[in-house]
Image: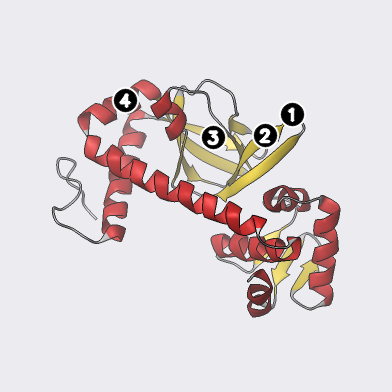
């Protein structure tokens, strides 16, 4: 799809998918032009909570986990993230330190890093794009709040079933790698429980023929039943 940078969104368009795609294409083009491509490996931190927000980040290849330290020795995984995600926008807009960290979980990841001054230039040149970006960001935050509320109201077994389904859906395959992207420790931090509890529930799911574990690979074999458990 070709995008006219002087008029990125057709007037009177009510197709939200088209608006999102056109805005994303324009943003991606700008970030690639203004930014610097960085390469990271597994366990590298793209940025850390509390650091000065000097850059905006656009994930273009690989996967990461978006985490927040709720205590000095305790972290909560907010989300497992995939390409075409933007990070650091609230900190840049509010001129505050990053409020979370982004850690790479795939063997390799490529990220576009954009200086905050270049982002401020974008705000001056194309404010209509930034307004829509803020709208998408608000939608993402509402989604995270909804997920948090949903997690609080469910049992640990329900939360784990939902996490397995969601992670599998994002990977587009019914198999999760328990060594790389979805370790039991990460699953525990994601759903707010202990690693021991995750191991116990995974064993139960396996005994109930909901999943199969072969080495480090976890296969979802009965997604309808997992959906019923997740509620």
- Residue 125, x across and y down, in percent: 21, 30
In the displayed structure, 142 sits above or below 167; it is: above
The CA span between labels 1 and 3 is 28 Å
**Which residue in the protein does label 3 denote?**
39
Secondary structure of residue under mark 3 = strand
Circle 4 SS class:
helix
Residue closer to the observer: 139 or 11: 139
| In this picture, residue 220 sits left or right of residue 58 | right
Percent across and percent down for residue 140 are 45, 49
- Do tag 1 and tag 2 residues touch (Cβ < 8 Å)? yes
Of the two numbered discs 4 and 3 on the same chain, state the one appearing first in sequence: 3
Provide the secondary structure element on which disc 1 rests.
Answer: loop
Q: Which quadrant of the structure image shows residue 28?
A: top left
Mark 1 or mark 4, whichever is nearer to me: 1
Task: Please rate how many residues cluster around mark 3, counting C-alpha atoms within 10 Å: few if below 14, some from 14 to 19, many from 20.
Answer: some
Total marks in image: 4
Spatial CA distance of label 2 from label 4 is 28 Å
Query: Residue under circle 2?
Result: 69
Location of the C terminus by quadrant is bottom right
Residue 8 is left or right of residue 120, and the answer is left
Q: Distance between the residues labelled 1 and 2?
A: 7 Å
Residue 104, quarter of the rendered image? top right
* Residue at image coords 23%, 40%: 128
The residue wearing badge 1 is 72
On screen, residue 164 above or below 221: above
Neighbours of disc 1 within 10 Å: few (<14), some (14-19), many (20+): few
Observer able to see residue 14 = yes
Where residue 120 is drawn, which disc sits there?
4
């Amino acid at each position: 799809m070709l995008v006219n940078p002087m008029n990125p969104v057709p007037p009177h368009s009510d197709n939200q998918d088209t608006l999102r795609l056109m805005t994303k294409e324009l943003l991606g083009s700008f970030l690639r032009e203004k930014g610097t491509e960085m390469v990271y490996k597994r366990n590298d931190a793209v940025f850390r909570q509390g650091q000065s927000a000097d850059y905006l980040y656009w994930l273009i290849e690989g996967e990461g986990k978006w985490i927040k330290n709720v205590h000095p020795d305790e972290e909560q995984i907010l989300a497992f993230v995939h390409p075409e995600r933007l990070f650091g926008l609230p900190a840049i807009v509010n001129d505050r330190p990053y409020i979370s960290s982004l850690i790479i979980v795939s063997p390799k990841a490529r990220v576009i890093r954009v200086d905050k001054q270049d982002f401020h230039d974008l705000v001056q040149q194309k404010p209509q794009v930034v307004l829509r970006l803020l709208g998408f960001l608000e939608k993402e935050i509402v989604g995270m709040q909804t997920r948090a509320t949903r997690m609080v109201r469910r049992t640990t077994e329900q939360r784990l079933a939902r996490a397995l389904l969601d992670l599998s859906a994002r990977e587009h395959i019914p198999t999760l790698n328990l060594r790389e992207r979805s370790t039991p420790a990460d699953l525990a931090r994601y759903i707010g429980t202990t690693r021991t509890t995750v191991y116990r529930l995974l064993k139960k799911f396996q005994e109930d023929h909901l999943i199969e574990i072969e080495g480090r690979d976890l296969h979802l074999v009965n997604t309808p039943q997992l959906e019923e458990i997740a509620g």
